[in-house]
C-alpha cells in the first residue's frame, strides 16, 4: 500500500523513527541497521512495509530496498512476525544475513534474541533458494566488477542468464571470479562460474 515516506526526521530511537511528511508524523518501526543509517540525518526517506492485524496497523521502515526485501522474505516464513524479522535485521546487516542463509549457519542465526534453533533452521530451509532471486542492490560492487573487465563480464553474465541462472547469483559468482583474476577470458570465466553455480 505504501512504498516509502520522505520527510523530516522528527524523532529517532534504535527501534523507531517519527517522520514528518506533509504535516503528518508517521511512527515507523525500524531496525538497528536502519537506525545507524539515519540517526544523524535531518531529511530521510524510508522504504515501507505496512502490516495490518486485527488489533493494530504498523509501518516498518528501511533505509534501503534490499533491507525491505529481506524483511518481506523473513516474514514469509511461518512463525516469523514483523518484530522477529526486525530483531534479526537489528542483529545482522543485510549482507551478513544473506551469508548466514547462503551458508546454512543456523547456529549463528539462533543467536538472535527470542529465536530458537528450530525457527532458525526453518528460515534457512525456506529462504536458501529465494535469496539468490533477490535483486542485488550492491551497486558499488557490481560497478567495480563491471569496470574491471566490462566486455568479458557482460558477455559472461549474458551467457549465464541464457543458461537459466538467476542474475543476482551470476553477478555474485562473476564478481568473485574477477576479484581473484581479472585477466581471464570469457570462456574461462563461464567455465569457472558453472563450477560455482
Image (cartoon, rainbow, N blue to C red):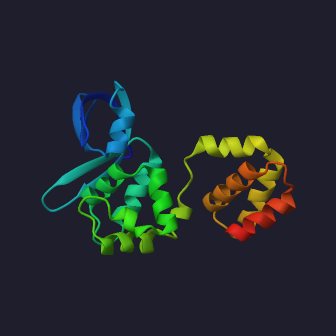
45 relative to 83 in the view: left or right: right
> What quarter of the picture does the C terminus occupy?
bottom right
- Count of numbered labels shown in the rendering: 0
| Residue 28, placed above or below residue 56 | above
Location of residue 92 in the rendering, given as x and y in whole percent from the top left corner: 39, 52
46 relative to 175 in the view: left or right: left
Q: Between residues 137 and 177, which one lies in front from this camera angle?
A: 177
Q: Residue at x 27, y 71 (%)?
A: 79
Q: Between residues 176 and 62, which one lies in front from this camera angle?
A: 176
Location of residue 31 in the rendering, given as x and y in whole percent from the top left corner: 31, 46
Dividing the picture into quarters, in which one does residue 61 lie?
Answer: top left
Location of residue 6 in the rendering, given as x and y in whole percent from the top left corner: 36, 33
Direction left: furthest residue? 55
| Residue 182, placed above or below residue 191 | above
Q: Residue at x 46, y 53 (%)?
A: 96
Q: Between residues 123 and 108, which one lies in front from this camera angle?
A: 108
179 relative to 138 in the view: left or right: right
| Residue 119, placed above or below residue 26 | below
Location of residue 76 in the rendering, given as x and y in whole percent from the top left corner: 36, 67
Is residue 1 among what the camera can see?
no
Q: Residue at x 87, y 55 (%)?
A: 185
Is residue 120 among what the camera can see?
yes
Q: Residue at x 46, y 62 (%)?
A: 100
Dividing the picture into quarters, in which one does residue 41 lie?
Answer: top left
Amino acid at each position: 500500500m505504501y512504498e516509502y515516506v520522505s520527510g523530516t526526521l522528527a524523532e529517532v530511537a534504535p527501534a523507531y523513527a517519527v517522520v514528518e511528511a506533509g504535516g503528518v508524523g508517521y511512527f515507523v518501526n525500524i531496525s538497528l541497521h536502519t537506525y545507524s543509517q539515519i540517526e544523524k540525518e535531518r531529511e530521510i526517506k524510508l522504504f515501507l512495509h505496512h502490516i495490518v492485524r486485527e488489533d493494530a496497523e504498523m509501518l516498518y521502515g528501511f533505509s534501503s530496498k534490499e533491507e525491505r526485501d529481506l524483511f518481506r522474505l523473513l516474514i514469509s516464513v511461518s512463525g516469523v512476525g514483523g518484530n522477529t524479522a526486525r530483531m534479526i535485521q537489528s542483529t545482522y546487516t543485510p549482507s551478513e544475513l544473506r551469508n548466514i542463509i547462503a551458508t546454512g549457519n543456523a547456529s549463528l542465526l539462533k543467536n538472535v534474541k527470542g529465536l530458537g534453533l528450530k525457527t532458525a533452521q526453518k528460515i534457512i530451509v525456506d529462504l536458501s533458494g529465494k535469496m539468490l532471486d533477490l535483486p542485488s542492490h550492491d551497486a558499488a560492487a557490481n560497478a567495480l566488477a563491471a569496470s574491471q573487465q566490462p566486455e568479458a563480464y557482460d558477455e559472461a553474465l549474458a551467457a549465464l542468464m541464457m543458461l537459466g541462472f538467476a542474475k543476482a547469483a551470476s553477478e555474485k559468482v562473476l564478481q568473485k571470479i574477477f576479484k581473484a583474476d581479472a585477466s581471464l577470458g570469457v570462456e574461462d570465466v563461464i567455465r569457472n562460474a558453472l563450477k560455482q553455480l
